[in-house]
Amino acid sequence: MSKLIAIILFCIMLPFAIGYKAPELSEALEYDLETIAEHEQVVAVRSTVYQRLRLIEKDHKKVIKYKPRIEEADIKTARVFMDRYCIDCHGPDKQKGQVRLDTIDWSIADNDTAQRWQDVLDQLHSGDMPPWDEDQPSEPELVKMLDTLSIHIEDARIQLANHKGEIKMRRLNQREYNNSVKALLGFVPPRDMVPEDIESENFDTVGNDQFFTSNDFEDYLEAGKFTAKQALEWLPKPHQEAKATRQDKAEEKLKRYLEIVKKGDAQMAMKKKGKSWKEMGFKDAGDASILFSQFLWRVDLPRRYTELPQAKDGIYLTGLSNGFDAHIARHIDPRGNYKLRVHGGYVGNPPENRKVFRVQHTFKDVIGTYKFTQPSTDPQTIEVDIPLMPGQRHRHAIDVRHDYVGGSHQRNMKAGKGEAPLLGDDPWASMWIDWMEIDGPYYNKEQSLLENLMFPDGRGPGIKAKRITDRELIETFAYHAFRRQKPNPEYIEQLYQYAREIQLKGASYNDAMADALSIILSSPKFLYIVEPSDAPTGQQKLNNRELAIRLSYFLWSSPPDDELYEANLQDPEVFSAQLDRMIQDPRVNAFRDGFITQWADLFRFDAITIDQNKYQGYSQGLRYAAKEEVKQFFGTLIQENLPAKNFIHSDFVVVDHTLANHYGIEDVEQINQAFTKVKLPEDSPRGGLTTQAAFLMLGSNGERSSPVIRGAFLQEKLLHDKPLPPPPNVPELGTQTNEPLTNRQLVKLHQRQKVCSSCHKQMDAIGYGLENFDAIGGWRDFEFVKGKELPVDPTSSLPDGSKFTNIHELKDLLLEKDDLVARELVVSMLSYALGRTVQFSDQNEVDAIMEQLKADDYPIGSMIKEVALSQLFKRK
Amino acid sequence: MEEIITNSTTRRSFLRTGGAVLALPFMETVAGPISSTPKAPKRVVFLGGGFGFTKQTFYPKRAGRFSEIGLTQGLAPLKRHINDFTMVSNLTNVGATNPHGGSAVYLTGAANAPSVDQLIAEELCKDTRYNSLVLSAKEPDGSQNSGHGGGLSLSYDVRGNTMPGIEKPIELYQTLFRTADDSREALDARLKKKQSVLDIVRVNGSKIKRTLSSGDQEKLDEYFTGIRQVEKKLERQAKWADIPKSEAPFGLPNPGLTGEDEIHIMYDMIIVALQTDATRVVSYRQPVCSVLAGMGISLKAHALSHYGFSKPRTLASEERDQKCSQLFAHFLDRLKEAKDVDGSSLFDNTIVSYGTNLRSGHELRNLPAILSGGGAKQIQHGNHIVLPKQDTPLSNYWLTIMQQAGIHTDTFSNSTGNIPELLST
């Protein structure tokens, strides 16, 4: 290690060697030495940081205590194992390979010891030790030893990573940064300009996991400048009157197809007369051969389109013309919101999922899916709120298209030939749109800081912008950007001079001011949430301002509003009233989405590619709805203050028409557009997080369901018992087979290896209970493998041995332990709220919160409040 | 407890005069034929590939010369380089404990420690335009899914902080080649403006520091380290402002390139970067998932790493291995074709390392280590070397490479010495 320091020192000294002299060299050096010492410490901590609490239920009174999971007796057994199989060669007498094992301390007090035990564990895992010609442990002996050692090392690592409750100063994550900029400027920076959050096992609020690079600084500067300039340019422009612009592209489209047909027919006629490609007007022979070989597709299908009955009056959504862009008219005002109206209906008698159109930004962000409930002969108008795409850089355009095109290429070719119906039960064209219109802009009542400065009395006819000096603007902006902290006058002066100087050099006013504001937005006082304290960790109360900020970023992922800043939060009644207000405010959706998408691992969701050949019912709309369901479901639990056990099972689902169709819920006319809470029939297997499409898709590799992933997830989230990380150095399975095997049989291959079986036995077993759900969450009784139909077997057991034969029984067993999912949620929410991991030392606080919630079965709304009311939350 | 550089005037004047201090580098300055033959510098390239390879078909079973023991199926595409690369067995990265961590501590040997490429760059790249090139493919699936684990790239700076990499071919292109706004005036203006920004930021930050706990200090240090790095980059840019970058030898790459195409063009640009002496050290964390997607394999990197489940998966894994070897062989081709400043080939003066932390599946022991290039003068290529000691620290291997690159040191990270078996006597 001393060498390392030497190298680091050398490198720090390098700048001095090659160039300049710093005025206070000794001071600077001292500072850097301290930093090195700190870095050394964090090396150990950071490498193994992640939280995990495990509880052991003691006696029937259900007093729950945390404690190390390995008992004295386990250690004793392990010692016997070592004496018997290891110490002969690696003990006091012999030290084969210069390894001696009898002297390693069982109480693991440092990373070095942990590493030595890890080496022992690796040897056992790999099967290299004991050597083949020595005494071999029996399988149960070995499995027990592996279990003990793995858990013991894991516990030690958690202990060694103890941060003693310290909350590291944290940087605004991407969501918080966007919201904070929006509160100041009224605009969100373009998504591709904002530094991304790092991948972490913990929530994006945990400061310890973040790091800051030179690229980040430059990115913040650029993003801030872009956004500030946009805001300054729009600031003086008056609000526009809302107006609707209608688009009817039917005629244009029909004309285009008629031309294609006419030209194609003419070329075909010439071909029959033996004309050359040149005479027919092609660029080359290749172009000609493409047209003629794909004549059905390129000419006959458009021909069929022109023959459709309502082609003159509107547009059909077909495989040929699957949608059209409803461009928001030029002169769009990015400060306002718009509405899209679609007037049309379904044609023939198509399947439910072909009555659905999807509205999306051209950059693929799905806004929603909508279903025609009336036929095209009796058209209806569907209205869609179009949120502005955050940080839109380019022209705003909206796509309206089939959500489920259905129909293979062959099917379309048949339609072209006239062998398959154009309209009807199995239609080619399943939706018809008469017209679409864009209506807006509609402005939000809330003003950004910048607007408040210039238009303190709001906008309106005759209201002029207030005159305000540049210095005043910079100072007020900095004060709010730093969350009501007075900026240093010297700083303001420098910013002012800087802006002036570049203006003198020819920069425009907006450019110069945007430059100055972007520096404020890249400053540590804006980017970091700082809670300085002169007392030991956890001893000092947050002051009013700090508490308002912590609360606001917890529930809204945004800076506090005026009311919150001004409330006396030290008064318990005021605090509680503010909490209620905040939870009822729509801004709480930032917590809803921010917490649940991370808790439920939804960040992985977008990385899963569904095999669309295998899963015909899959569509973009289904993917969108599946993700949205998790948020909407959690939102319902918050707003209706429902118990945590609803994650295991709920007697309702919160779905839209796409999911209702996917789940086989009938009679859903009322849930056309918005997500709606629907009561489930008694015998439905759905309900709870466990049977939601998003979770089931996450628990697949896109082709097949994965009992392993599903089981591990349930064990972690619902049983509050995160499986150990996979052991290193386990040889890859050599078993291969071309036999058709069910998933379950395939997964069981894992367990043939003893080193795998100790963990997989548990987590896979839970996962088997969900085998009735395929990779996109559809119900199945059979699995189709290599052309064979194999029955699904969902019978299995929980880690404690209790057996279940189907999903209902699995849920019932889990419901008996509903305090576990509640505890998992409390611990996670605390971690999210505090911005640090929750550890052994926090157990009393966690217990106290659990105790408060127990009588009402741990309702979610109250849980959020109790977390905010806890002593941990109010102290630093 | 203040910053190293508190006096902004000092820094600004340094920026202004910086250009004159530098001895002119030969490549990007010397146009046309070179009159007096200068000595070709040493270069080192580290390529990292996520999860490991197929156990049965990639790794040679015996030690010896490849021309005698033959190439395995996975290595077969390297046939035309059979005497020009070395494979070392029995190396283990003792710092890597999480099999899903992929290449997390691959070049460091331990968490939050400097990586070998950066230590070499400190020595080799004093007089090049860039201290080193850190390339790191960014995949939509995230780095965990790609088998690379945490961190932003393979490289960690001398303080042990992860370094952001150049993610896209187009970014590397714009870094390496001349663009329209490269004029001295434009650059001066940019540099000066940025410098004043940094000055202001520092005024704002310095006041916070005094009141913070040590944990918070550390976070703020990170921020100011970031600022200091921006400054360092500026200083280097200022030094080089008068020396034009080289002309691009090909057009702007398509911004949407992924997978195999991405690796191809990145490899090609690495060659140009080395040839023009824009830098002498490169690390490249390669894309994995998009390579698979490009080959028509629908499995993600992690799923494929557990190839043992079925025959088709194993076949896909083997196919992937061959693809990687093919791409690597292409890189060696280009190195051999490229002429160096002294008339030798670039290959003769470069050390190339290719590998990753994992052997296959979850095995962290006995990782794949392939070495090529004539830059390591003491290494005779063409052999599969099986080290006598199992789990020889990977750091020993890096130390050996450091020494071959001309760095005077006898230790790196947790090394216990260099690897004499690699060196011909």
Image (cartoon, coloured by chain):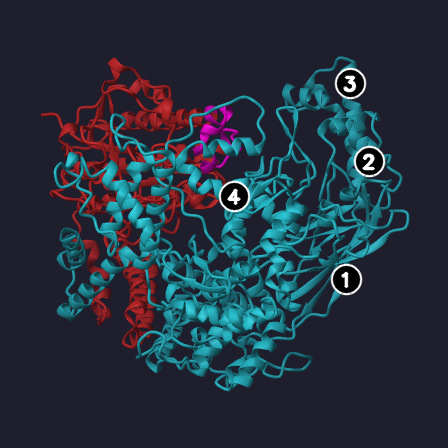
Element class at badge 3:
helix
Tell me if mark 4 has few (under 14), some (14-19) or many (20+) residues whose alpha carbon lies within 10 angstroms of its own. Answer: some
**Would you say A492 lies left or right of A742 here?**
left
Choose mark 4 or mark 2, whichever is in front. Answer: 4
Residue A811 is inside the magenta segment = no
Mark 3 — residue? A270
Mark 4 — residue? A709
Choose mark 3 or mark 1, whichever is in front. Answer: 1
Element class at badge 1:
strand
Residue at 17% of width from left, 46% of height from top? B123
Residue B305 is inside the magenta segment = yes
Percent coordinates x, y for residue A557 in the rendering? 52, 67
Q: Earlier in the sequence, mark 1 or mark 4?
A: 1
Q: Which mark is drawn over residue A244?
A: 1
Mark 2 — residue? A427
Choose mark 1 or mark 2, whichever is in front. Answer: 2
Percent coordinates x, y for residue A750 in the rendering? 46, 34
Q: Earlier in the sequence, mark 3 or mark 1?
A: 1
Colour seen for chain B:
red
Q: Is residue A655 above or below residue A495?
A: above
Residue at 68% of width from left, 47% of height from top? A621
**Would you say B182 lies left or right of A98 here?**
right
Which chain is disc 1 placed on?
A
Residue at 46% of width from left, 46% of height from top? B142
Element class at badge 4:
helix
Q: Amino acid at mark 1?
A: Ala
Q: Amino acid at mark 3?
A: Met
